Amino acid sequence: NAGVMQNPRHLVRRRGQEARLRCSPMKGHSHVYWYRQLPEEGLKFMVYLQKENIIDESGMPKERFSAEFPKEGPSILRIQQVVRGDSAAYFCASSLADSPLHFGNGTRLTVT
Amino acid sequence: KQEVTQIPAALSVPEGENLVLNCSFTDSAIYNLQWFRQDPGKGLTSLLLIQSSQREQTSGRLNASLDKSSGRSTLYIAASQPGDSATYLCAVPNTGNQFYFGTGTSLTVIP
């Protein structure tokens, strides 16, 4: 029973490029969350999705960031035209309703 | 907006000691509270989930308590071991299932 799978583990992008981060939730989990962790800071909520629906995107920057969780396939966090300030660890978590969060090992994005 | 605070920010103890980590939250209308550990460069591992109707949960050497009315939770670690060294985070969800995290307590257990 695989846990939450995120790929890639490390991603390097030059300023202006696009970054695509993938997350496969635990089997049977229909709730997916994306969090960002900046160096020396806590985890900050970005977006909460259920299959084909964005439930809460209040933590997502208004521009350049988007997320989806299609009916088939992984959840994708997409960052367009990356800037140095986007460098961070991005964590995905999944859960059933009212059950513990299970986290992936994260994708560490470095923008050069 | 919910704010979660963890004290202390860092803690260093000799092996074998019992220790307490603290978590406080400003909005007591919570559904549950969850404790995690994070190892350097890794993701988060769920340790304990306490429902709002519960006062404590235990798993092995770990015991978490919850006092909703005072907005506090504690994580008690008995007989600490070097392998317990990690950052410990507490998190509470809002009504929309968005989790608010504290900034964590970095624990070092010295052999």
Image (spheres, rainbow, N blue to C red):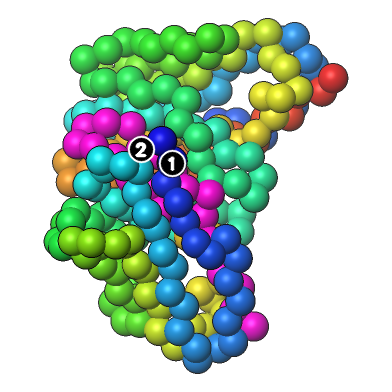
Q: Nearer the viewer, residue A1 or A69?
A: A1
Q: Residues within 10 Å of mark 1 (few under 14, many from 20)?
A: some
Residue B68 drawn in magenta: no
Q: Are marks 2 and 1 in contact (CB under 8 Å)?
A: no
Horizontally, residue A86 falls left or right of residue A110, namely: left
Chain name for mark 1: A
Chain name for mark 2: A
Question: Visible in this render: residue B63?
Answer: yes
Residue pictured at 23% horizontal, 61% vertical:
A72
Horizontally, residue A83 falls left or right of residue A95, namely: right
Where are the magenta residues, as a range? A91-112
Residue under numbered circle 2: A101
Residue A101 drawn in magenta: yes
Residue pictured at 44% horizontal, 10% vertical:
B58
Q: Residues within 10 Å of mark 2 (few under 14, many from 20)?
A: many
Horizontally, residue B85 falls left or right of residue A58, namely: right
Q: Secondary structure at mark 2?
A: loop
Image vertical order of residue A10 relative to residue B88, above or below: below
Residue pictured at 62% horizontal, 9% vertical:
B78
| Real-space CA distance between mark 2 and mark 1, rounded to the nearest whole angstrom | 11 Å
Where residue A3 is drawn, which disc sits there?
1
Total marks shown come to 2
| Place of residue A5 in the rendered image (x, y in percent of width and height, measured from the top left) | 45, 51
Image vertical order of residue B84 relative to residue A85, above or below: above
Question: Visible in this render: residue A57?
Answer: no
| Place of residue B83 in the rendered image (x, y in percent of width and height, measured from the top left) | 71, 25
